[in-house]
Image: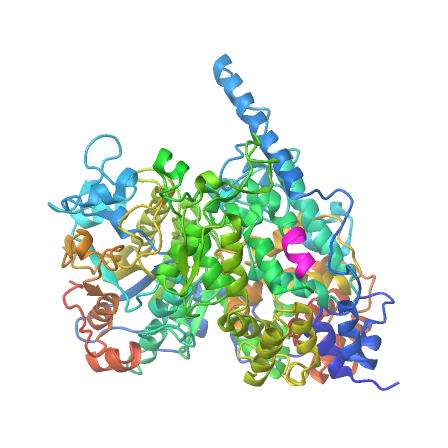
């Protein structure tokens, strides 16, 4: 059977696997030009990490200096003395002890925290909250495309980056849309024969273009990321798995012709009961996240210098612990920035206070910053996207939300 | 005999689990009377119940797991007293992982294929791969040191399954076998739909894993062709749901227990009842309504090992934990009335117009398209309302609609549907659930273990992702490679789609260089993957 339909390198006499593993991994299909900022010769990278389930920002970066914090957070409040002490970031805020790598980056001025931040969503559904966070629209229900994909679309032609990288078995909404993306998940299985894959690709091209695209991308990325020790199960968030996912993504993004933009999601942050304070369930998750950030730092190597990682979640949790040593769905929370390009060592917060009268609906940390301002600031500084494009295309109808300037060094 | 092959494809794939192989005649039967073929399963008395020897009730399973945990605790206590390491018995039963070590058994993809194709294990060893994880989903396996997941690592000796793992597999096997042998599979598809709507996650802990199957058998199946309100009441009072959404921990702040123990409310179950089980987001409820409902259902719990409140593992109403007094929910006052206070709220929100709309939309989306025809949604909403939530009427309304038959086959089979359909086509009744369970893990749909209380996604965006398709291809190739030369893929194509198969698919299969390759391509063909 001839494969005269195929225009990819799969059709050549060389086997696809040999070709890809031979070092030509991305070049073989990187028909889009490599992105580089002409102005300063930097080659910026951006990773968006979504924490699904709504991170307790008050438990991660604790306002130790707020007289109401310890009472509200009760048995799970962080302390700065004793065993598992939180790390003071400035004279007011302290970082959870499970995040030593982030603490070091912060000291090295390569990490920053934005506190009392939220999207424009004010209700308490995870799924709507995630839609808003990832779609970039002001309200829920818009799930056709994500803001990161639209940002990609609006990069100047000719300077367009490689396809963005979606890490995991499914593409997160933030990266869905018309700009091309590739997916990769760290899982090893017996491989189907190249020839079988080629024939299937041909069938799909004629009968099912959507599956053709998915299959081709799935094959390419998997091959490119092979050759190391990443064999966790998909869709899981153990500490080790979070690190391995980040290691694989960093490897792909470190390549000269690798993706410049990536997105991944970690589940499990919905801590209704037994959240734990300095140790326990949340501490485990934060330790995994911290490990993932460290993997990006080491895996990106030279590229780390030009990288910004943004960690965000759909909303926060109640300021007061509930009846089961956990927290329920709340509003204000944190966003984290890490990376060599971050102008770090800073807490960025217009602190609203935790007095009952200052809490949103008497329950939650009141948001004083819009998460879109953070994202806009990063996209502006990293990729030169203009305010108008950000306000109309990337985050529609968001003109009043000005980009937070100066987040990138 | 009139034959409508396109309609047969819809009947088998959209509504069911695909045609069975062997001499079933499914495709011919479906083609001669497509609607009748689908609806036949709705009129079988008790056809949705799953009563299999060896499967126990929730209280019996509760007792078994309570006893098991107690034994382990005692063994550990004894060991720590004597200074000896606590080995011998199984791993820690608490929290997400019943046992991390047992999971590194040889449940690889090639094994799933093996179970479907039933080939000699000896020939598979060379293909055994790195995925030495097991059915138990996430936490445990990934918490293991990374090096244990590497292909080079020596396999640990197999360990006996503990009671939790045995139960989970037995429940899974019963469900898989039922789906594999059903004529059309429409009733089982309805079970899967409702089970996902009212999902729990077996990853919540040993009790949830133990009860995942009995929850579905007791709270879902009896009502799949009954009334929505009855399913709702059964689900929200089932120990598995109460455990999954933390309600057994929730105490009325002013209840006797709440005052004494200085613990209080947990809104988790109340919120998901309104958001995910009935009204839907934007369904007209407020935060105050959620909190009120949370107060109302305080005391809804299950009896523990000691049986102080009742038979261990049964639903009980603990008046000591119940928030006293009347509550207002969505503008209506519910007087203090014990457990009946909460039942009255459920009865009302089950009949709320938002619930009808939410359920009708989700139902239509599952069976027709990610963006279901508005006329179909409207009709199903109307059926739901006028029949007072009669779910058999809802299913019948779907099959009787023209939209459900005319919509193009654009939805991708879920991983569960794909694996079951493969087993059916190859006429292999599963003998070991482990291999299917592993396949579901790999494809991102671990059985009874969705990542959140909203269940597994139901859109192409979720399942037709690059990595997912690539993994399906690998699984198909494994199934095919294990099958040797015992089947003719051209014959199977007739069973799958007959003359509804596209010329391209037919040609691709006919021109394949081997039977194995042809079968892999058939399993990946649009005719097999789309529904």
Specify whether residue B17 is painted magenta: no
Expressed as whole percent of the image width and height from the top left, the position of residue B484 reads 78, 59
Regarding residue A159, the answer to whether it shows in the image is: no
Residue span colored magenta? B216-223
Regarding residue B468, the answer to whether it shows in the image is: yes
Q: Nearer the viewer, residue B354 or A110?
A: B354
Q: Nearer the viewer, residue B392 or A143?
A: B392
* Left or right position of A368 against B429: left
Q: Nearer the viewer, residue B364 or B134?
A: B364
Expressed as whole percent of the image width and height from the top left, the position of residue B146 reads 47, 42
The residue furthest left is A91
Specify whether residue B217 is painted magenta: yes
Dividing the picture into quarters, in which one does residue B165 lie? top right
Dividing the picture into quarters, in which one does residue B447 lie? bottom right
> Residue placed at 20% from the left, 45% from the top?
A69
> Residue placed at 26% from the left, 61% from the top?
A307
Expressed as whole percent of the image width and height from the top left, the position of residue B10 reads 71, 78
Expressed as whole percent of the image width and height from the top left, the position of residue B367 reads 62, 74
Say which quadrant the N terminus of chain A sits in.
bottom right
> Residue placed at 68% from the left, 43% from the top?
B57
In this view, B130 is above or below A223: above
Colour scheme employed for the rendering of this structure: rainbow
* Left or right position of A54 against A16: left
In this view, A315 is above or below B510: above
Q: Nearer the viewer, residue B321 or A321?
A: B321
Q: Report the magenta stretch's main SS.
A: helix
Say which quadrant the C terminus of chain A sits in.
bottom left
* Left or right position of B482 against A228: right
């Amino acid at each position: 059977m001839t494969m005269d339909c195929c225009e990819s390198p799969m059709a050549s006499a060389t086997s696809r696997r040999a070709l890809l593993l031979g070092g030509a991994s991305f070049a073989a299909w990187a028909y889009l030009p490599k992105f580089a900022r002409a102005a300063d010769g930097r080659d910026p990278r951006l990773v968006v990490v979504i924490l699904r389930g709504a991170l307790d920002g008050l438990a991660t970066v604790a306002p130790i200096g707020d007289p109401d914090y310890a009472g509200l957070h009760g048995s799970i409040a962080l302390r700065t003395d004793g065993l598992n002490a939180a790390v003071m970031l400035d004279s007011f805020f302290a970082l959870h002890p499970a995040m030593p790598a982030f603490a070091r980056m912060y000291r090295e001025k390569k990490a920053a925290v934005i506190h009392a931040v939220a999207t424009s969503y004010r209700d308490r559904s995870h799924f709507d909250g995630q839609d808003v966070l990832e779609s970039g629209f002001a309200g829920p229900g818009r799930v056709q495309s994500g803001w990161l994909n639209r940002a990609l679309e609006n990069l100047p032609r000719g300077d367009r980056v490689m396809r963005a990288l979606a890490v995991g078995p499914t593409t997160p909404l933030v990266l869905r849309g018309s700009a091309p993306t590739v997916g990769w998940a760290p899982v090893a299985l017996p491989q189907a024969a190249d020839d079988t894959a080629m024939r299937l690709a041909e069938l799909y091209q004629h009968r099912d273009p959507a599956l053709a695209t998915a299959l081709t991308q799935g094959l390419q990325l998997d091959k490119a990321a092979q050759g190391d020790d990443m064999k966790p199960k998909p869709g899981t968030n153990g500490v080790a798995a979070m690190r391995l996912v980040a290691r694989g993504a960093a490897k792909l993004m470190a390549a000269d012709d690798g993706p410049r933009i990536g997105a991944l999601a970690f589940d499990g942050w919905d801590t209704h009961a037994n959240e734990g304070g300095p140790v326990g369930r949340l501490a485990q998750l934060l330790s995994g996240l911290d490990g993932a950030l460290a993997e990006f730092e080491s895996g990106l190597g030279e590229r780390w210098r030009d990288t910004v990682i943004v960690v965000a979640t759909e909303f926060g949790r109640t300021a007061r612990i509930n009846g089961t040593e956990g927290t329920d769905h709340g509003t204000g929370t944190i966003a984290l920035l890490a990376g060599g390009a971050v102008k770090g060592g800073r807490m960025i917060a217009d602190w609203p206070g935790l007095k009952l009268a200052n809490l949103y609906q008497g329950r939650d940390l009141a948001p004083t910053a819009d998460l879109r301002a953070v994202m806009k600031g990063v996209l502006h500084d990293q990729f030169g996207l203009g305010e108008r494009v950000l306000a109309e295309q990337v985050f529609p109808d968001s003109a009043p939300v000005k980009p937070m300037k100066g987040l990138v060094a | 005999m009139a034959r409508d092959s396109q309609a047969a494809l819809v009947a088998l794939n959209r509504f069911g689990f695909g045609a069975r192989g062997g001499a079933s005649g499914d495709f011919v039967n479906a083609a001669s009377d497509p609607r009748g073929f689908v609806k036949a399963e709705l009129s079988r008395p008790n056809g949705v119940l799953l009563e299999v020897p060896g499967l126990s009730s929730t209280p019996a399973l509760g007792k078994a797991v309570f006893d098991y945990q107690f034994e382990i605790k005692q063994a550990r206590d004894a060991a720590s007293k004597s200074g000896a390491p606590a080995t011998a018995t199984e791993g820690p039963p608490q929290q997400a992982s019943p046992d991390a070590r047992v999971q590194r058994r040889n449940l690889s993809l090639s094994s799933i294929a093996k179970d479907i194709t039933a080939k000699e294990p000896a020939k598979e060893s060379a293909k055994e791969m790195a995925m030495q994880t097991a059915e138990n989903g996430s936490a445990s396996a990934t918490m293991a040191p990374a090096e244990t997941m590497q292909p080079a690592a020596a396999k640990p000796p197999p360990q006996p399954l503990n009671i939790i793992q045995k139960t989970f597999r037995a429940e899974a096997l019963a469900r898989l076998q039922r789906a594999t042998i059903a004529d059309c599979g429409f009733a089982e598809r309805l079970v899967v739909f409702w089970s996902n709507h009212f999902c729990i996650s077996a990853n919540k802990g040993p009790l949830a894993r133990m009860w995942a199957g009995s929850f579905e058998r007791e709270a879902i199946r009896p009502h799949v062709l009954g009334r929505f309100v009855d399913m709702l009441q059964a689900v929200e009072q089932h120990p598995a749901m109460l455990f999954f959404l933390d309600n057994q921990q929730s105490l009325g702040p002013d209840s006797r227990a709440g005052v004494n123990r200085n613990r209080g409310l947990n809104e988790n179950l109340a919120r998901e009842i309104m958001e995910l089980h009935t009204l839907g987001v934007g369904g007209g409820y407020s935060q105050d309504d959620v909190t009120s409902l949370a107060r109302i259902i305080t005391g809804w719990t299950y009896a523990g090992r000691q049986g102080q409140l009742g038979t261990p593992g049964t639903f009980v109403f603990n008046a000591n934990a119940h928030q006293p007094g009347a509550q207002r929910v969505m503008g209506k006052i519910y007087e203090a009335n014990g457990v009946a206070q909460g039942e009255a709220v459920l009865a009302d929100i089950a009949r709320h117009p938002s619930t009808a709309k939410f359920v009708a939309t989700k139902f239509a989306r599952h069976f027709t398209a990610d963006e279901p025809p508005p006329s179909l949604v409207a009709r199903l909403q109307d059926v739901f309302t006028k029949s007072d939530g009669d779910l058999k009427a809802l299913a019948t309304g779907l099959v009787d609609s023209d939209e459900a038959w005319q919509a193009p086959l654009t939805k991708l089979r879920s991983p569960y549907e794909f694996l079951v359909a493969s087993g059916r086509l190859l006429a292999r009744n599963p003998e070991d659930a482990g291999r299917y369970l592993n396949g579901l893990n790999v494809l991102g749909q671990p059985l009874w273990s969705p990542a959140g209380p909203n269940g597994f996604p139901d859109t192409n965006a979720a399942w037709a992702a690059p990595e997912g398709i690539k993994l399906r291809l690998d699984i198909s190739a494994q199934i095919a490679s294990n099958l040797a030369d015992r089947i003719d893929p051209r014959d199977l194509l007739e069973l799958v789609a007959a003359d509804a198969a596209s010329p391209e698919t037919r040609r691709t299969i006919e021109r394949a260089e081997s039977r194995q390759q042809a079968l892999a391509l058939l399993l990946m063909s649009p005719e097999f993957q789309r529904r």
